Image (cartoon, rainbow, N blue to C red):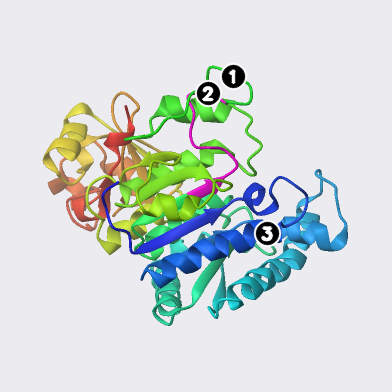
Amino acid sequence: MARRYHRIVIKLGTSVLTRGTKRLDRSRMIEIVRQCVELVERGCEVIICSSGAMAAGRERLGHDDPAASVAVKQMLAAVGQSRLIQTWEQLFDIYGIPVGQVLLTRADVHARGRFLNARDTLRTLIEHGIVPIINENDAVATSEIRVGDNDNLSALTAILTDADLLLLMTDQAGVYTADPRTNSDATLIPVVERVDRSMLRRAGESVSGLGVGGMRTKLQAAHTAQRAGIDVVVASGGLPDVIIRAVGGEGVGTYFPAHGSALEQRKRWILAGRASTGRISVDEGAARALTQKGSSLLPAGIRSVEGSFQRGDRVLVYGPQDDEIAHGLVRYGRDELERIMGRRSELIEELLGFTYGPAAIHRNDLILMQEAAT
């Protein structure tokens, strides 16, 4: 890693903050704060995406039921969130650095207006020398608006803040060829150029004990950030000076290099937005036009549509080999696309009685994902 990093998002898993115990480990947290302060003194900007709210709630209430209901977990998060931010505030205050709490849900990046508002809030905190402490709003979030894990939340945060580096701190040394706790032949993977299906499948089959999702969510987050032009490192939060070393380019953990330059803001929003139930399958010609020529997706190349979506929703585009090739904002809803798919664009107005233009998805509203389909 030869890049000089300026804005860094640091995701801290519960296992890192508790050191594997049932309570927040203040000695571990102060060590993390010390490294963050060192980066700030070097001129870097630091954003923390912190897990640990439910752990703090359990500690405060003496509650130790791993099979607790959703309502109880939200109660624990509500109690623990204030204790978690208070702890961060006290530790950063030792160095005279203020912190600001920001609670997010996927709804905050789904709507364009809320995306911009969240981005501006975070940027303003950073500009005033305040370290944002971000977590998902677990106390009130429902399944429809939850991101679901702080790994993917940290990737969305990195996109929101135009970060150049995302550090995913966990209790593992990085990404392995297999689960090192069950396979003695597992070896650390130093660099992952692209996150492919086989890697996700292996991670999904392992039981890592790393909180919600484990290593699979870290790979998903890394892929999202890579596509947005952000470097990613997955490493052990228990290594001495791991944050400083990772930012300095030392080979700690597993490095995921960014794919090209950073995406423009609108495409960052498309990539960060709500996961859609919509799916469009295209023929070979359309897939080639999208991936090789940078073309818009025309109705003539669409073979089928699935799921529920309206005009302006983000949908996934699949090729003839069932490979995910793009994400994009549709200009026509599902019912409309079913009526015009496979037909020439000049027939749209005749078939629908109106037109929003010749493209089902314009190339300016489309992000290619072909690199992930290996």
Query: Residue 110's image quarter?
Result: bottom left
Badge 2 crowding class, 10 Å Cα cut-off, few under 14, some 14 to 19, many 20 or more, is: some
Q: Does the CB distance between marks 1 and 2 fall below 8 Å?
A: yes
State the SS at label 1.
Answer: loop
- At label 1, the amino acid type is Asn
Pointer 1: what residue? 183
Pointer 2: what residue? 178
Badge 3 crowding class, 10 Å Cα cut-off, few under 14, some 14 to 19, many 20 or more, is: few
Q: Is residue 238 left or right of residue 331?
A: right
- Residue 303 showing in the rendered view: no
- Residue 189 showing in the rendered view: yes
Q: Mark 1 and mark 2: span between their CA atoms?
A: 7 Å
- At label 3, the amino acid type is Ser
User: Sequence-wise, which precedes: disc 3 or disc 1?
Assistant: 3
Residue at horizontal 58 percent and vertical 62 percent from the top: 135
Camera-nearest label, 3 or 2: 3
Measuring from the top left, give residue 354's x and y in whole percent.
Answer: 23, 58
Residue closer to the observer: 244 or 23: 244
Q: Is residue 359 left or right of residue 69?
A: left
Query: Residue 77's image quarter?
Result: bottom right
Marker count (numbered): 3
Badge number at residue 27: 3
- From the viewer's perspective, is residue 365 above or below residue 46? above
User: Sequence-wise, which precedes: disc 3 or disc 2?
Assistant: 3
